[in-house]
Amino acid sequence: MEVSKEIVIPAPLRNGDRVAIVSPASKIAPELIDAAVGQLGREGFEPVVMPHAKGECGSFSASAEARVADLRKALEDESIKGVLCSRGGYGAVHLLDELDRLPETMFHKWLIGFSDITALHALWRRKGVASLHAAMAKHIGRGAGCFACYEKEIGILRGGEAGFSCDAHKFNFNGSAGGRLVGGNLAVLGGLIGTRFDDIEPGCVLFLEDIAEPIYKVERILWQLRLRGVFDRLGGLLIGQFTEYRPSADHASVEEMMERFFRPYSFPRAYGLPMGHIEENAPLLLGATAHLEVADNGVSCGFEL
């Protein structure tokens, strides 16, 4: 983990701006990219499908070298103002070492994605640039998800309000926190612990979500963070959706396990937030300074832009 640096918020997207579509990890059905191209066009943007975005190389869209080349090309092109990932899956970590060699100024454009794209969000923050944890081409193309969430995503990209509010949850722990919002997919974050892309800094607000991870594996990664001292200096915690798992002999749910796990800590915690591998995947502005309020009547989070 490195000392925090000032974060740049990418310039708002305008009509006519070019948005690259990349596949930095797993392969995707080409027709989903074609559908996303149409939707972006209707929003007034000019989609640019990178050469290997529709490709196939085993389970990946292309070789690691080709995926790096696509993203590098999108970053080097000053006319491209945003980078929309097609999907997650696995493989974004392959790109980090090479892309980290590029100058920080190349990253001053929007990165949009979630899940395995958590690795690239960590790279963007390392370069001092905020990014958007939000629906990808896969979801935009098939018309999946919450329309209000999609509108919010486009609104943030255009320079709109990024804050959110949610109902109270029985496991919430009340309090206030202000700090850099970091995080994403827990399994991906666990793989970055102890590397130069580990950006869970003291005083930050940490967001976590995951899919198809057994409860014991989630707990094991939490213990890894705990033993590293992360939770001793955390500002606040946002817990999104943990989906597609089964109850265990020890815990009825991930949230129930987490509630027990975090009892020794006094930082504010918000559970059950509508972010993650769900239809209602609300966008989050990673890297920005968040102001979190958890109270009996609900949760609110605003951002300094």
Image: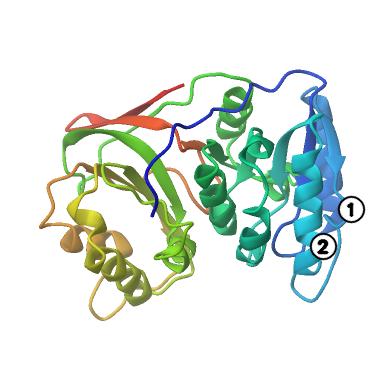
Q: Amino acid at mark 2?
A: Ala
Which residue is at 39% across, 73% downward?
Answer: 246
**How many numbered marks appear?**
2
Question: Percent position (x, y) of residue 151?
Answer: 61, 27
Report if residue 260 is visible in the image: yes
User: Of residues 100 and 87, which is closer to you in this image?
Assistant: 100
The quadrant of the rendering that contains the N terminus is bottom left
Question: Percent position (x, y) of residue 101?
Answer: 65, 53
Residue 14 placement: quadrant: top right
Mark carried by residue 144: none
Which residue is at 31% across, 74% downward?
Answer: 220
Q: CA distance from mark 2 to mark 1?
A: 9 Å
Mark carried by residue 66: 2
**Label 2 SS:** helix
- Looking at the image, residue 236 lies above or below residue 300: below
Q: Residues within 10 Å of mark 1 (few under 14, many from 20)?
A: some
Question: Percent position (x, y) of residue 23?
Answer: 75, 55
User: Circle 1 sits on which residue?
Assistant: 51
Left/right placement of residue 105 relative to residue 62 reads left
Which residue is at 80% across, 26% downward?
Answer: 45
Left/right placement of residue 17 relative to residue 124 reads right
Left/right placement of residue 171 relative to residue 125 reads left
Residue furthest toward the right? 51
Q: Find out whether the residues at labels 2 and 1 contact each other: C-beta distance under 8 Å.
A: yes
Q: Residues within 10 Å of mark 2 (few under 14, many from 20)?
A: some
Which residue is at 65% across, 39% downward?
Answer: 107
- Looking at the image, residue 64 lies above or below residue 277: below
Q: Amino acid at mark 1?
A: Pro
Residue 226 placement: quadrant: bottom left
Which label's residue is closer to the chain start, 2 or 1? Answer: 1
Report if residue 244 is visible in the image: no
Question: Percent position (x, y) of residue 30?
Answer: 86, 56
